[in-house]
Amino acid sequence: MKTLGDIGRKYAGKGVQILGIARGIDAENEEEAATIAAAAGADYVQLIATEKMEENVLHNYEAAPATIMVGRDAEILGDAVTGTKDSAYWNSEVEKYHSKVCVNDHPADCGVG
């Protein structure tokens, strides 16, 4: 999770945002989930999964963590990745999809590197 936070900071302002989706969270355990995310270095936006998110997408991914690259038009890019990976892997994945998503964007809005 910390690696994804590092990637999010590296690409900030370049058309990439890292979001976490916490599953199985309700008002009773919301603070506990925030503590766990912070301890894991997940210092990026954490969304709480809704029933609709579970029905439409998340039910396909039982393993955790599962990472899904999503384009700005909500299209799922490639296959989900389960388990943890190093920053070289994530940099490669972000670069691969970033160039596809940012086609025709002004370089100042979506530049890499």
Image (spheres, rainbow, N blue to C red):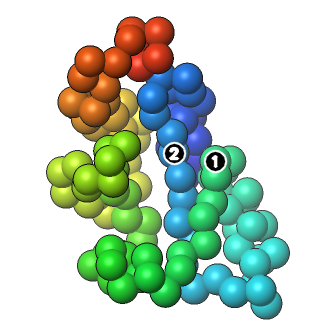
Could one spot residue 113 in this view of the protein? no
Q: Identify the residue at image location x=51%, y=45%.
A: 18
- Report which residue position mark 2 lands on: 18
The type of residue carrying mark 1 is Tyr
x, y (%) of residue 77? Answer: 23, 49
Which residue of the protein is positioned furthest toward the bottom in this rendering? 28
> In the figure, 82 relative to 2: above or below?
below
x, y (%) of residue 58? Answer: 37, 76
Q: Nearer the viewer, residue 21 or 81?
A: 21
> Which comes sooner in the sequence, label 1 or label 2?
2
Could one spot residue 25 in this view of the protein? yes
Label 2 crowd bin: few (<14), some (14–19), many (20+), radius 10 Å: some
x, y (%) of residue 71? Answer: 32, 44
Asked if residue 42 lies left or right of residue 106, the reply is right
- Report which residue position mark 1 lands on: 44
> Which secondary structure lies at badge 2?
loop
What is the count of numbered marks? 2
x, y (%) of residue 34? Answer: 75, 67
- Residue 13 location, quadrant: top right
Asked if residue 84 lies left or right of residue 71, the reply is right
Q: Are marks 1 and 2 in contact (CB under 8 Å)?
A: yes
- Residue 33 location, quadrant: bottom right
> In the figure, 106 relative to 83: above or below?
above
Q: CA distance from mark 1 to mark 2?
A: 6 Å
Label 1 crowd bin: few (<14), some (14–19), many (20+), radius 10 Å: some
